[in-house]
Amino acid sequence: MRAAALPAALALAAFAVQPTPAPQVEASFGSYTPGAAAVTYDPAAVPTGATVRLAIADAATAPKVTLRLTGLVPDRAYGAHLHQRPCGPDGAAAGPHYQHTADPAATPEKPSSDPAYANATNEVWLDFTTGPDGSAQREATHQWPFNQQNPPRSLIIHAEPTQTAAGHAGMAGARLACVNLP
């Protein structure tokens, strides 16, 4: 029996050292249904059938978030951020931006607009401009881990690039689409 136990122990050890796969979503935008991976709230700006690939590497140490999109409106600027809650029937369901250090003055009804908290260093901002073919790619890397008990749950695509001025920091217009994180 000892000979059989050794290969099993080696198999378990090999399994233990395998890296955890990065959370990843590959989907086409469509109308909201419970559990949908990618939802468009404004098909004129994020057309039904446009595609998204969202990947997160090293979420427990230094997250690198990669966003790739196709089929959007050509030559258009958008804002994009990770949010605290999953997608819902409207963009508000995703709640406020995910922040590494939460703004103590912010609430779900009044998200942070203080540039000390609502900034690209404390949040994950992935603003992008599509090319002539309607595609875009963007990456963001941070030197802090995601909160494992309360990680970001979605990505919202906004109507405008993100503002940075006091009182408006983090604002990026209407919520056009949402992508659920696994």
Image (cartoon, rainbow, N blue to C red):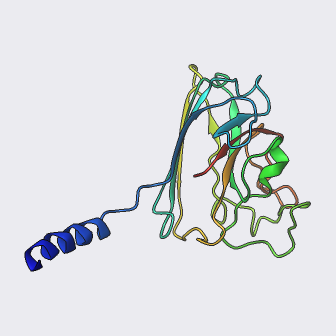
Q: Is residue 86 above or below residue 179?
A: below
Q: Residue furthest front?
A: 1
Toward which corner of the image does residue 159 lie, by quadrant? top right
Query: Where on the picture, by quarter, is residue 107?
Result: bottom right
Q: Is residue 180 above or below residue 113?
A: above
Left or right: residue 53 versus residue 91 is: left
Residue that lies at the very extreme toward the right in this rendered image: 109
Residue at position x 66%, y 68% in the image: 150
In which image quadrant can residue 129 be found? top right
Of 150 and 3, the residue lying toward us: 3
Image spot of residue 12 (x, y percent): 26, 70
Percent coordinates x, y for residue 73 in the rendering? 67, 23
Q: Residue at x 48, y 66 (%)?
A: 62
Q: Nearer the viewer, residue 27 or 75?
A: 27
Q: Position of residue 36 (x, y in %)?
A: 67, 39
Horizontal side of residue 115 vs 130, given as left or right: right
Observer-nearest residue: 115 or 26? 26
* Residue projecting furthest to the left: 3
Which residue appears at 20% of the width and 70% of the height?
Answer: 8
Left or right: 18 as drawn, with respect to 25? left
Quarter holding the N terminus is bottom left
Numbered label tally: 0
